[in-house]
Image (cartoon, grey):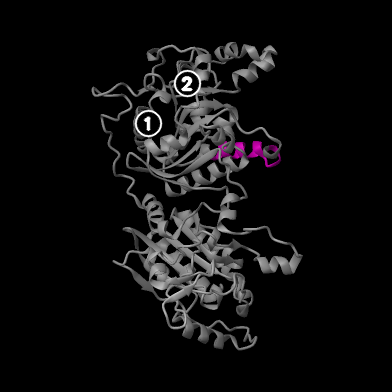
Amino acid sequence: MTTEGGTATTTAGAALDGVDWTVCPGCDALLYGKRLARNHHVCPDCGAHHRLTAHARIAQLLDPEGLELLDVPADVHDVLEFTDTKPYPDRLAAARAATGLSEAVVLATGTIEGNPVVAAVMDFRFLGGSLGSAVGESITRAAELALATRTPLLIVSASGGARMQEGVLSLMQMAKTSQALGRLDEAGVLTLSLVTDPTYGGVAASFATLCDVIIAEPGARLGFAGPRVIRQTIGQTLPPGFQTAEFLLEHGLVDLVCRRGALRPTLARLLSVAGVDRTVGLGVDPDRAGGGSAAGPEVVVRDPGRLPGIDAWQAVRIARDLDRPTTLDHLALAFDDFQELHGDRVGGDCPAIVGGTARLDGMPVVVVGHQKGRTVGELVARNYGMATPAGYRKAARLVRLADKLRLPVVTFVDTPGAYPGVAAEEAGQAVAIAELIRLMSTLRVPVVTLVTGEGGSGGALALAVADQVLICSNGTYSVISPEGCAAILWDDPAMAPAAARALRVDAGNLLRLGVVDGVVVEPDGGSQADHHTAAHRVRAALATTVRALSEVDAATAVAARYERFRAFGSPGRGRGTPGSEGPR
């Protein structure tokens, strides 16, 4: 077996010299066992997450009611008749005697806060959690059970890598388990990976990183080649924190780093989104309906003649007001149970794009949007809402997840445009935008876009290839900024107000052109003056639109989305052509 990650100095419930005391591997503090257990086996001094046995992990995550442990294959695959300092069968027998396990993984079915799940939980104590034939068979059986019952699959990984005593057969388990997860992708069954310390080699390069959502415990290490292999092979000195959960989050390779005490509610939130009945809650609440009610003002206007006039340049200035609600503001006020997910799984996590799962008026959805920030520090950190290729690839990953789970997609647009820097061009900015536009065109789920502030160029369009495009009444949408247009065509940036009027960037003109399908009326003084009222109207407009689109079958929706954009600039098709009066 491989031994990356070393051996555990402590495990859940370990005793020191016959007394219930444990030495923390993170800070060498002497910890009282009962206090450590109450803290989920996390050091109260340094925060180090102590390794757990598979059974302790299952007890911590799954509800006790209905929990069932499944049989794990325990055949000895000693086809090589392998012997190092002792024969392989003897090593297996010693591991079984020491751990009480038949193999390095435990399978279970049950629930997490009432949400059904099939769980495969690895145990590092058993030959370093190495991936052998029995482990691969167990993971595959868990995936097949999840497929047969259409139940989400949770895999908890802890492994030093492939089991060398089984030679190339252990290598084949990487393909075997990867194929099993691929079948779950095709069937639309949610898969979750919880990465614990350590996870290396064949496990890291197969089922641990192929799941829809990857969660890592703080400090957990994940990588294909472990530090010792890297040093021995190429002699490189590794940077501090290399391959840790925090390093992986920064590089877009995991969705979130979650402390052990928060794992149950986090997993439950994700599982509940995948398991909800899509037919529930599709009725329209008249007090939230897009057409308004006697109890309140009209929320969505679809007739441009009913909109009050606004000067295009004034709209530009309002749309850029830093006090306007951001995407994260709307997610906090208009949605419930938002779980942000990170990373493009390639090497980056652009902060100018945020997204994840949420509930909109009770309906599970995937939400993606530009995020500018409000203070100078936030604006700089978020790159002023200008996404890099990693942002568009993160968006693509999230909407693919929505398509797999048949969840509606809601996007928020508020950006001056895609980031125009050298690094972005080197990373394929144009390709990332083009691929996202194509992907959005083919999604088999309802897609609704709301332009909340600026809609700038292709950087905005990438998130706005939707069945319905709405815009806040002070929002704007344009091929280029007014200042850019003025500098190019007038050779005078001071002509920006004239350019804004010529480009017709305001909501009323966009509705007349059919570029948007409806205008969400902002409260008096604009959304920046009253975030709560603005969010209430956004919630009503989006919920009504999503419900209506959810009544349309996938093939019809995809065809209608194609026709929506096919019509722009096409004579006689009624969108963006002379004489067009907007959407029909």
Q: Secondary structure at mark 1?
A: helix
Q: Which residue is mark 1?
A: 535
Q: Which residue occupies 41% across, 71% down? A: 56
| Residue 506, x across and y down, in percent | 49, 18
- Is 152 within the magenta? no
Label 2 is placed on what type of residue? Gly
Q: Is disc 1 in contact with disc 2, using a CB cutoff of under 8 Å?
A: no
Q: Which residue is situated farthest in the right direction here? A: 234
Q: Which residue occupies 76% across, 65% down? A: 235
Label 1 is placed on what type of residue? Ala
Pick the front one: 413 or 446: 413
Query: Which circle marks residue 514 in the picture?
Result: 2
Lower position in the chain sequence, tag 1 or tag 2: 2
Q: Is residue 239 left or right of residue 350?
A: right
| Residue 406, x across and y down, in percent | 42, 46
| Magenta segment | 425-439
For the C terminus, the image quarter is top left
- Is 437 within the magenta? yes
Q: Secondary structure at mark 2?
A: loop
Quarter occupied by residue 127: bottom right
Above or below 349: residue 317: above
Q: CA distance from mark 1 to mark 2?
A: 24 Å
